[in-house]
């Protein structure tokens, strides 16, 4: 059996695992959902039936059950050669992936104030695998780390400087693992090296962000102190006027309620009043549901504005890149967004956009377009597996 690399991605009530061999071939993937609840379940992708879990299974129990299932199916030997964990927030401490030791665990825990919903569950996953595989090198790969190359002009808010000094209030940015993959994959497809390639990368999933990448490095990004800032998202508002908080207070809306609404009841869901799911929204809009059509309009207009904003950080542009569930699949979103950007010289080839390059090189721009436009499926698991392999080899 070949040596395997295990990739672990813990959400608040979910666990996703992926298993790669050393040649970057994905051997298997698995997931557990609704953890800590009565209807928790786990499954190896493409496999039936579900993997049995104890009642109210937690992350550790789900991990044990899925690892046993991998072993039973001869997908994994006793222990993987290395384990890579996705960790949401690395603060300013982590500029790149690290080998996990007690100090790293402490530092990740110290960043939890910046990501109270995410870092503690990421740590739960790390603790579970350290316990189960005490001799296996474990690596943390951070969603924020790629954006640590932002200059102060891009990461500082126009706030009293003590907010940054005392409380670490700044733009961190997220989706860094995906944007990093785009920087490398776009360069490869364009026949260039990442160090000489500048792109604007849009990651459009349930969460959405856009990043300016100059010569392979992140130089500006739309998400901020938290993943709430920037683009319109599934249930998140993205940018709003901060004056909204005081205005809503005068209307009797408590701060906690505003926070909840901006994160969970806004974005595509809030505008359409129906759904946060872009595919369903497109179907509703096609059927004449006007609030759904408006939600798509606002989503694309905000995105186009941000493409323009990202230009301020670049001296040349090799490609605009679309990724994430919406970016990879929504013909309409790509067409509408680029429709706002004619003045900058973007021009889409509607036929290529329809086929969106899944089976080609991913190019969807018209021959007259000033800039290439690429559709690239993201692969965050592969980035984590590569880092886990690289750092384990070096350890
Ligand atoms: P997550 O951020 O949870 O990983 P994804 O990257 O899978 O999410 O993106 C989910 C979004 O992608 C949803 O809004 C979904 O409707 C959208 N999506 C997936 N397929 C299509 C499609 N064919 N057309 C339009 N939107 C799509």
Image (tube, helix red, strand yellow):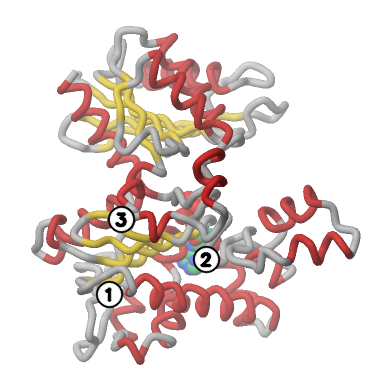
Query: Observer-nearest residue: 21 or 178?
Result: 178
Q: CA distance from mark 2 to mark 3?
A: 17 Å
Looking at the image, which residue is at 58% across and 77% down?
298
Q: Quadrant of residue 232?
A: bottom right
Is ligand 1 closer than 8 angstroms to the Cβ of mark 1?
no
Position of 186 with respect to 234 (left or right) is left
Q: CA distance from mark 2 to mark 1?
A: 19 Å
Dot 1, how many residues are within 10 Å of its Cα: few (below 14), some (14-19), or many (20+)? many
Residue 246 position in % (x across, y down):
79, 62
Residue 347 position in % (x across, y down):
30, 87
Residue 333 position in % (x across, y down):
47, 75
User: Compared with residue 244, is residue 305 higher up or lower down, i.e. above or below?
Assistant: below
Which residue is identified by label 2? 231
Dot 3, how many residues are within 10 Å of its Cα: few (below 14), some (14-19), or many (20+)? many
Q: First in sequence: mark 2 or mark 3?
A: 3
Residue 218 position in % (x across, y down):
30, 55
Quadrant in the picture for the N terminus: top left
Q: In what element is the residue under mark 2? A: loop
Q: In what element is the residue under mark 3? A: strand
Position of 196 with respect to 347 (left or right) is left
Dot 2, how many residues are within 10 Å of its Cα: few (below 14), some (14-19), or many (20+)? many
State whether residue 272 appears in this view: yes
Q: First in sequence: mark 2 or mark 1?
A: 2
Q: Quadrant of residue 57?
A: top right
State whether residue 48 appears in this view: no
Looking at the image, which residue is at 41% across and 66% down?
327
Residue 195 image label:
none
Looking at the image, which residue is at 59% across and 60% down?
234
Which residue is identified by label 1? 373
Residue 218 image label:
3
């Amino acid at each position: 059996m070949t040596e395997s690399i295990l990739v672990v991605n813990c959400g608040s009530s979910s666990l996703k695992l992926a298993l790669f061999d050393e040649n970057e071939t994905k051997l298997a993937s698995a997931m557990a959902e609704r953890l800590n609840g009565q209807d928790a379940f786990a499954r190896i992708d493409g496999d039936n039936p579900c993997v049995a879990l104890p009642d109210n299974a937690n992350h550790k129990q789900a991990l044990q059950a899925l690892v046993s299932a991998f072993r039973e199916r001869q997908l994994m030997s006793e222990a993987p050669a290395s384990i890579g964990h996705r960790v949401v927030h690395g603060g300013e401490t982590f500029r790149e992936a690290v080998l996990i030791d007690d100090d790293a665990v402490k530092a990740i825990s110290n960043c939890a104030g910046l990501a109270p919903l995410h870092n503690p569950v990421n740590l739960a996953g790390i603790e579970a695998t350290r316990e189960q595989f005490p001799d296996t090198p474990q690596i943390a790969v951070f969603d924020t780390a790629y954006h640590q190359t932002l200059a102060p002009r891009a990461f500082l808010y126009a706030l009293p400087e003590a907010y940054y000094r005392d409380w670490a209030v700044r733009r961190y940015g997220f989706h860094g693992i995906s944007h990093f993959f785009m920087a490398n994959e776009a360069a490869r497809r364009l026949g260039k090296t990442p160090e000489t390639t500048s792109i604007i990368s849009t990651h459009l999933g349930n969460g959405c962000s856009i990043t300016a990448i100059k010569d392979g490095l992140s130089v500006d990004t739309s998400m901020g102190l938290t993943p709430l800032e920037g683009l319109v998202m599934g249930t998140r508002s993205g940018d709003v006027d901060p004056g909204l908080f005081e205005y809503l207070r005068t209307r009797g809306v408590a701060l906690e309620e505003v926070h909840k609404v901006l994160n969970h009841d806004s974005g595509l869901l809030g505008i359409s009043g129906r759904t946060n799911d872009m595919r369903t929204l497109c179907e509703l809009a096609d059927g004449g549901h006007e609030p759904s059509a408006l939600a798509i309009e606002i989503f694309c207009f905000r995105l186009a504005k941000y493409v323009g904003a990202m230009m301020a950080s670049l001296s040349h542009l090799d490609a605009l890149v679309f990724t994430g569930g919406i970016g990879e699949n929504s013909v309409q979103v790509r067409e509408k967004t680029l429709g706002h950007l004619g003045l900058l010289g973007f021009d889409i080839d509607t036929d290529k956009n329809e086929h969106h390059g899944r089976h080609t090189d991913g190019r969807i721009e018209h021959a007259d377009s000033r800039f290439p436009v690429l559709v690239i499926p993201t692969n965050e698991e592969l980035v984590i597996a590569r880092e886990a392999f690289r750092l384990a080899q070096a350890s």
